[in-house]
Image: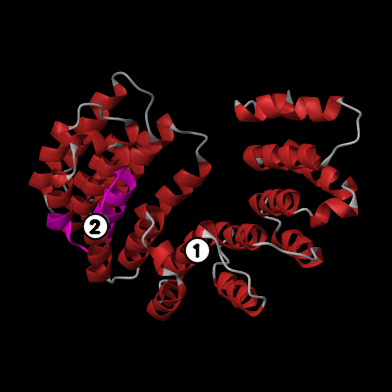
């Protein structure tokens, strides 16, 4: 039953069951419980997860699957120190345990530690699996340092480099590090491109100020592969490159305009000081939807960059009326007004 609850994403019900039953857990039950707590990641889940971990028999700590789920849970709680302590206490570590630790470092903004763990894996002749390589590429991407990126790429076996998820991660990494040529070279090598691969390349063009290339690739992308992320990536790329006409055209072609897509277009128009058009978009959106503070923040940021104090004050007053309890956003708004 617990497995069924977790499989159907009924995590709160699963926790209810964990608290009710008074039986001795086996390794599988502990694994399910830790995964459930990691998914929920709220105060209750943290309390239950740590309580279960404290009473877990020592012999289960050397079970790679159970330990991996426990480390993953602790990292998602933001408890890096406890995850590290547990990692060090495990005698026989598999690639999945190293992967869980490195993924946790990425989640908690400590990506630089991944490289140290990778060196430890090499010393112990532990071969990273595809997931671990993906995590290391993500760490390199976050570091933004070309020598880290190239060093990791040089270590990846060719049979792994040719897997589509790795190729997509490499496109994203090179794009974020400013090596757009390398990103494009990998993209050209991908045989069966999927939505994620196209999105990674479109986003890479956008990050490097190549809005025209992003729009061109979006046009080449098969319609059935386009999703909301594709549309947001290309609109952002056009926005940062100042391609207003292209952004308008793409936006008007989108049949299902979600809140995120409209917010992106509001941001684009605000960046280019097209405030009347941006406000009209917001007004139309609010006819059938709850107001979005993110849209107003984009508008306010654009007004501030345009040094339009009258408009800035008008937007901020509107924000105070609509979102009186959004203290953080209102505080950020005051900063933009100053």
Where 111 sits versus 63, above or below?
Answer: below
Residue 300: say if magenta: no
Other residues around mark 1 within 10 Å, as few (<14) / some (14–19) / many (≥20)? many
Q: Is residue 208 left or right of residue 20?
A: left
Query: What's the magenta bit mostly, secondary-structure-wise?
Result: helix
Quarter of the image containing the N terminus? top right
Lateral position of residue 197 relative to residue 55, left or right: left
- Identify the image's colour scheme: rainbow, by chain, secondary structure or one colour: secondary structure
Q: Residue at x 31, y 51 (%)?
A: 197
Q: Which residue is mark 2?
A: 206
Extreme top residue here? Answer: 288
> Vertically, is 308 above or below 10?
below
Note whether residue 299 is visible: no
Residue 281, located in which quarter of the rendered image?
top left
Element assignment for label 1: helix
Image spot of residue 262 (x, y percent):
27, 35
């Amino acid at each position: 039953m617990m497995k069924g609850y977790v499989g159907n994403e009924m995590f709160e019900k699963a926790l209810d069951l964990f608290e009710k039953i008074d039986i001795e857990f086996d390794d599988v039950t502990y694994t399910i419980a830790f995964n459930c707590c990691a998914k929920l990641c709220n105060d209750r889940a943290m309390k239950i997860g740590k309580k279960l971990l404290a009473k877990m028999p020592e012999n289960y700590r050397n079970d790679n699957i159970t330990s991996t789920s426990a480390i993953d849970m602790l990292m998602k709680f933001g408890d890096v120190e406890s995850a590290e302590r547990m990692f060090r206490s495990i005698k026989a570590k598999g690639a999945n345990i190293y992967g869980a630790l490195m993924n946790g470092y990425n989640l908690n903004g400590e990506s630089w530690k991944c490289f140290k763990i990778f060196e430890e894996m090499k010393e112990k002749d532990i071969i990273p699996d595809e997931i671990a390589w993906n995590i290391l590429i993500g760490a390199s991407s976050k570091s933004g340092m070309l020598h880290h990126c190239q060093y990791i790429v040089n270590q990846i076996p060719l049979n792994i480099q040719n897997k589509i998820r790795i190729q997509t991660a490499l496109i994203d990494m090179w794009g974020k590090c400013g090596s757009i040529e390398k990103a494009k070279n990998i993209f050209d090598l991908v045989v069966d491109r999927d939505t994620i691969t196209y999105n990674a390349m479109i986003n890479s063009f956008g990050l490097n100020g190549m809005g025209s290339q992003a729009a061109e690739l979006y046009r080449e992308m098969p319609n059935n592969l386009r999703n909301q992320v594709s549309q947001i990536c290309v609109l952002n790329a056009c926005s940062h490159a100042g391609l207003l006409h292209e952004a308008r055209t793409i936006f008007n072609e989108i049949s299902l305009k979600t809140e995120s897509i409209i917010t992106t277009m509001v941001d684009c128009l605000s960046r280019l000081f097209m405030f009347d058009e941006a406000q009209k978009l917001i007004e139309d959106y609010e006819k059938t939807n709850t107001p979005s503070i993110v849209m107003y923040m984009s508008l306010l940021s654009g007004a501030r960059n345009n040094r339009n104090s009258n408009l800035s004050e008008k937007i901020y007053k509107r924000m105070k009326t609509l979102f009186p309890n959004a203290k953080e956003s209102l505080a950020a708004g005051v900063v933009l007004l100053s």
